[in-house]
Amino acid sequence: MSEHAAGCGCGCGEAARSLPVVDVGRPVGPTVIEMAGVAFAYGQQTVLHGVNLSVPQGDLACIVGPNGGGKTTLLRLMLGLLVPQRGEIRVFGKPPHEARRRIGYMPQHVHLDPLFPVTSLDVVLMGRLGGGGGLGLYSRADQQIACDALGEVGLADMAKRSFARLSGGQRQRVLIARALACQPEVLLLDEPTANLDISVEEQLYALLKELNRRLTIVLVSHDLGFVSKYVKTAICVNRTVHTHEMSRLTGDVIRNLYGREIRLVEHAGGGAEVRS
Amino acid sequence: MTDFFRAMAGSPLLLHALVCGLLASVAAGVIGPYVVVRRITYIAGGIAHCVLAGLGAAYYFQIEYGWTWCDPILGASVAAILAALLIGWVSLRARQREDTLIGALWAIGTAVGVLFIQSTRGYAPDLMSLLFGNIMLVSARDMWLVAGLDALVVAIGLLFYNQFVAVCFDEEFARLRGLRVEFWYLLLLCLVALTVVVLMKVVGIVLVIALLTLPVAVGAIFARSLWQSMIAASLLSMVFVTLGLGTAYQANWPAGATIIIVAGAAYLLVAMFQIFTARRRA
């Protein structure tokens, strides 16, 4: 892992270097997700290369970086939905597709059909699929797990409400509940706060922080400045990956980080390439 | 309408027609919602037109070669399943050119069917009644075959409800839960195919899509979940078929087309009602 490396591009390397080298906050438990020398390309287009990272148990890590930098690709590699051309990925010490049942995944809700006739509880129950049996109705135990998951995200009274009629923030929470209904050990979330207003976003992060007491969480966000007070680790992605501990990044440093991040996005939008 | 029911008492053909229509309504009601939410109406249309090839071939071999076991409904079912698997395989493989390839299979299937039917000497089945249905010509044997297919489709469609809903709603998530998404998708298309065969007896190949989608679209104003949509679509479909048959009997109109006109009118009314209420709310 290349911690605090210069030229990461997001400016966080320089920000981190100005700090006293004290590692607190980031958990040092057993490794949940590990990547070594991973490279991935869509056809001729290299999206990620030389990726090394490890996510320890109990971490709350945020994948940040410019658009098109490979954030979602990185998440999909962890899920085994994409297979890298080079390198190795291990989740709980196994190839990702073998560890899927221990992962709870929340996709971006924009790819779902907004007119689909399902209730919130129906959606959450999908998290119970694939556990043997499967003929006819869900078992009472599965129903209970789904109801508990809805309760955990604060939507117990919305169980019978149509998914289509929920607000954006409520839909995100239903999808988190669906991921929780899988009874996972690690949660992977793709832009959980996309298109939400600030107060709803705040609530959602408070929920994730609460869940982090028992779960390892990795999420994708477009906005490190905002999530920095909640997350323990920043995984900066721009063609390659650098990991930084967040616990000591406060005040001026955060502003610096955030400022650099913004400038980088403009820079990348102009067509320039950022290499490490 | 009362005349229609009174006439039915004295006419087994009319009774067969109504029973067949009501049976088909259940299959359409259970499978239609899947077709609508998964947005595979075009695929269903393609399968329906490929069925003509199977029907044509069955008639051809039955009459030209004297293969009496080669029943048209059997031929249609085999062709429908083959078309479903082929079109399903194409749509899983060729994401970008999916609609072009399905359109091609749609046309080729129809063409093969027309050739078989025109090559059949002597008593040739009426192409019009295959394309637009002739429910007044349902024999008792046909009715039992339709009932069997109907039971099969409805049983599978309901037993694996959870899997089908999950695959239709969020394919990627279903895959991550360990579901074999391709298998469930192809199985769903096979059910669509058999439903097409059942509906074909009622409204004909060309009009099948209407009975798969219109009752679902009308029922959408009541339905909060997919199983509610199934119940609503089944009941609405039964109403449309009964009203359509009765009207067709009284006015001496073709039954298939009349049923579709009734369903289409109901759909337009509901659509206008929705536009009206939306405007009042705005």
Image: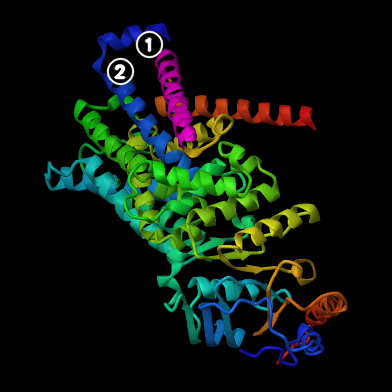
What chain is tagged by disc 1?
B
In the image, is B59 to the left or to the right of A254?
Answer: left
Residue B137 magenta-drawn? no
Residue B229 magenta-drawn? yes
Q: Name the residue under label 2.
A: B14
Q: In this view, does B40 lie above or below B200?
A: below
Foreground pick, A24 / B84:
A24
Callout 1 secondary element: helix
Question: Bounds of the magenta span?
Answer: B227-252
- Give residue B126's quadrant in the image: top left
Q: Callout 2: 10 Å neighbours few (<14), some, many (20+)?
A: many
Colour scheme used in the picture? Answer: rainbow
Residue drawn at x 37%, y 31% is B26
Disc number at residue B4?
Answer: 1
Residue drawn at x 74%, y 57% is A201
Q: Which of marks 2 and 1 is nearer the N terminus?
A: 1
What chain is tagged by disc 2?
B
* Magenta span dominant secondary structure: helix
Residue A76 position, x and y percent, is 55, 71
Residue A144 position, x and y percent, is 46, 43
Q: Callout 1: 10 Å neighbours few (<14), some, many (20+)?
A: some
Alpha carbon distance from label 2 to label 1: 9 Å
Foreground pick, A20 / B180:
A20
User: Callout 2, which amino acid?
Assistant: Leu
Residue drawn at x 70%, y 68% is A221
The answer to whether the residue labelled 2 contacts the one labelled 1, judged by CB atoms less than 8 Å apart, is yes
Q: In this view, does A206 lie above or below A252?
A: above
